[in-house]
Amino acid sequence: MVTIKDVAREAKMSVATVSRVLNGSGPVSEETNRLIREVVGRMRYVPHSGARSLITSKTETIGVLLPDLYGEFFSEVIRGMDDTAQRNGYHLLISRAYADRHGIETAIRAMRGRVDGVVAMSPDLDAESLLNLPSTIPIVLLCSVSRGNEIDSITIQNFRGAREMAAHLISLGHKRIAIIKGSVRNHDAAERLRGYRMALRDAGITPDPLLERDGDFTEAAGYSAALQLLALKKRPTAIFAANDSMAIGALSALRESGIAVPEEMAVGGFDDIPLARYMDPPLSSVHVPIWELGAKAVTLLLHGITHKNDHARRRERVSTKLVIRRSTGGEPAERPPPQTLNREKVSV
Amino acid sequence: MVTIKDVAREAKMSVATVSRVLNGSGPVSEETNRLIREVVGRMRYVPHSGARSLITSKTETIGVLLPDLYGEFFSEVIRGMDDTAQRNGYHLLISRAYADRHGIETAIRAMRGRVDGVVAMSPDLDAESLLNLPSTIPIVLLCSVSRGNEIDSITIQNFRGAREMAAHLISLGHKRIAIIKGSVRNHDAAERLRGYRMALRDAGITPDPLLERDGDFTEAAGYSAALQLLALKKRPTAIFAANDSMAIGALSALRESGIAVPEEMAVGGFDDIPLARYMDPPLSSVHVPIWELGAKAVTLLLHGITHKNDHARRRERVSTKLVIRRSTGGEPAERPPPQTLNREKVSV
DNA sequence: CTGAAATATGTAATCGTTTACATAGAGGGC
DNA sequence: GCCCTCTATGTAAACGATTACATATTTCAG
């Protein structure tokens, strides 16, 4: 591999001069500039970023710690991060880790010397214990908050979104509204449940434990939870699934059971994944701006990096938006439009 | 930040000894071993991997270059890579890049000194020109091949899978079978088209250009292509979409047009994303083992890294499997089972 | 014409590790 | 008692860049 020394030797200059040309630091004559660039091009020299970051103590890389994530959420949040990172000259070092405290700590150690900061997604509820991480590098928590204010965080407006969806169902006249919950110990899931309950109370309805079914965010969970709800003596008239995947599973179960949606059972989801509008019937959902979630996390982190982690901590929140389609019987705001999305999708 | 020197000073030993304890290289007395580990723990010392990789010239990181990818494919291929990488003590440096030659070259340079090898996904057809990359580090091409044998590659059995799906439709008695094509210049798309045509020829059917509609792998494209097909004077009786997203868009269009699936129109997809079985009717598709795709790419790359890029090049291929569900009218092999998938999905 | 300032370049220390080589003491075979 | 081998440790040279400081040359005000 050709190093800066090789270039210097070939150009009959010192390494310092070569470095100055390449970084535009310090003064260089026009002639030297040309000469060195020519040699660099000819020899195909590329600076060794590892060596560079050792002396500058900047890696221009940000670490991303994620739990096991599936589908659209994963790809979109990473897209948001990568777009923002690249725009600022940063790379992404991605690692999946157990969402618990130990897993995250281990992963963060393993990243020492490789990254300038870390975005950690740890929806697990005891992410709170992260607050006393022995870390001097900036950290941003995604989809969870830490007790105290020691760590920057960015979350989804789960509470508000869920409350709106439940309120929407109530406004359509539903009294018995079931919820298919998300994973236990998951922060988003807990907040969505809270929003659902709050909406019921707002309307003077007492939450019925029988109508709160367990789920784990998978289609299969939505499918079986819906069957259980149908088996109840006093069936609900509406189902709010804590995410779209479960809502889709539920739709499938209702279809097989010959239940008409939304006439006999209204169904609402959360996330508004692209597929939601292509369901039968098109699925009402709570839109989550996932790209922004990733983008903001990186922006927040870069801020921390710039200020050497010596900045006022922030807690941001991306806002959700209720999207009404046919599955709740609301007025369809949109139909699958033949609009040409400009996503050049590759395979999938 | 505490360095190895600090540890050495505190333990009243030389840095060499500390290094030896930490790496288990060279002999150390049991007593020294204990002492140093105690100090390391107490001072919370973590080796600086940047510095380490400078001298060892191993970064234990592999670079991943991806085009804009969406949904399940993206998350699953990365999961396959990360699982395999972690099992071998490697990290993933992920970057999205334009799929063309220039974009990939730039991205690869930017990774010099950060990674030991690169997995590049470049489904764009002129990935072929990559073959003379000025690179000395190992590279594995994902979902594309380079002319000549200079680069390892791993691809999907697109041709075989598409041919099987088309043959399946033919076996059900269909004569006029349309295809909704994938993105132009996309390698997977081209191969799937080739497989479709081959199956028709095998059955003595002449491919009809009118039945080959453009698409770009999005739901919206599938939706509008289906509408166009319905508007033909001589409608097809079956549609083969080059991926599931387009098949789902097509299903949606057919539903709105009051066309019964599969009675009036059979529909088949490609990829077999998890949602396929939850569609109405459940979607027949060609299953692609995406996780394996990522896993094998990394395995291949690690092989190249171990052998310092001085190994026989390989072209591997992951095999597809036809999955028949109701949308083609075939015998449903499975129904949405309440099986508890052990994917702890987080939010989505 | 002189000396200060500006410009262009080189020298060498430094970042935090690993590791080849050197050193020193202990053990043991003869 | 000698020499060889082991074991345990230290010294210092890398790795490939950046950069403070030194030096040499040019420019130019007074």
Image: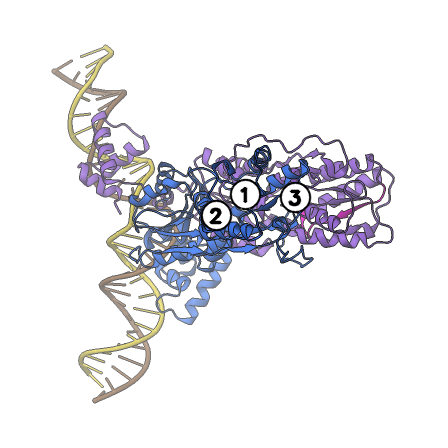
Chain colours: A purple, B blue, C brown, D yellow
Q: Label 1 to label 2, Cα distance in Å? A: 10 Å
Q: In which quarter of the image is the C terminus of chain B?
A: top right
For the question of whether residue A108 can be seen, the reply is no
Residues behind callouts 3 and 2 on a single chain? no
Q: In this view, does A44 lie to the left or right of A314?
A: left
Give the numbered dot on residue A260: none
Nearer to the camera, B120 or C15: B120
Nearer to the camera, B288 or B334: B334
Q: Is mark 1 on a helix, strand or loop?
A: loop
Write down the residue under mark 3: A148
Give the numbered dot on residue B200: 2
Q: Is residue A15 left or right of residue A80?
A: left
Write down the residue under mark 1: B176
Q: Do the residues labelled 3 and 1 touch (CB within 8 Å)?
A: no
Give the magenta range. Answer: A175-188
Total count of labels: 3
Say if the magenta span includes residue A160: no
- Identity of the residue drawn at 22% across and 43% down: A6
Q: What element carries label 3?
A: loop
Tell me where residue B28 appears, x and y as whole percent. Answer: 38, 69
Identify the mark nearer the N-term, 1 or 2.
1
Say if the magenta span includes residue A180: yes
